[in-house]
Image: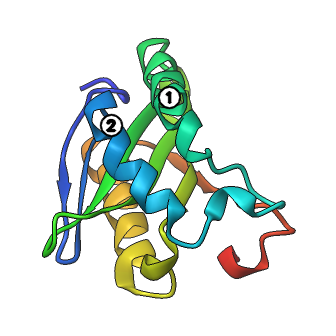
Amino acid sequence: MSLTTPVELLGEHVILKPLDVTQAEALKEAVCDGELYNLWYTRVPRPEQMTAEIERRLDLQKSGSMLPFYIEDRKTGRALGMTTLMHIEEAHRRVEIGSTWYRKSAQRTPVNTECKKLLLAHAFETLNCIAVELRTSSLNVQSQ
């Protein structure tokens, strides 16, 4: 299996689904919860930029450097945000987990922990990666 093959990852609280442009409206609503796009220390798309951001991530997937996910609340079906396996190095079996954002109401809940566990399990157990990096800005204290 290629490191960029789309998959669905199922957890107790979330479903990580392959990202698709049809999810843009739900993600626009999610990004308005807390106006995440106004945070100066992180890069979260504004609602009017959401479709372009999804297309950018899908282009990176086509080029072999990213596996983007749409994060859905398993109970409500609501969009919670986006995350990725990125900076993929197929030859070295290495990925980075990043470009993640969650709607404000999903922050400080089990969502992030479960998403990271699902991504780590997929990377190590399914994709046989030998290195996975988690990265966040030193300015983003809440995410550290």
> Which amino acid does the dot numbered 2 rest on?
Leu
Is residue 67 at least partly visible in the picture?
A: yes
In which quadrant of the rendered view does residue 21 lie?
A: top left
Residue 30, percent from left and from top: 42, 61
Q: Is residue 102 above or below residue 92?
A: below
Whether residue 66 sits left or right of residue 4 in the image: it is right
| N-terminal-most mark, 2 or 1 | 2
Disc 2 is placed on an element classified as loop
Whether tag 2 and tag 1 are in contact, CB under 8 A, the answer is: yes
The x, y position of residue 110, in whole percent, is 37, 84
Residue marked by disc 2: 19
Q: Residue drawn 36% across and 27% down?
A: 4
Pick the residue in front: 39 or 9: 39
Which residue occupies 82% across, 61% down?
Answer: 41
Q: Where does the N terminus fall, quadrant-wise?
A: top left
SS for callout 1: helix
| 126 to the left or right of 144 | left
- In this rendered view, identify the residue nearer to me: 114 or 40: 40
Residue at which label 1 appears: 57
Residue 25 vs residue 124, the one in the foreground: 25
Is residue 85 shown left or right of residue 38? left
How far is the residue under mark 2 from the one under mark 1? 8 Å
Q: Position of residue 32 (x, y in %)?
A: 52, 62
Front position in the image: 31 or 136: 31
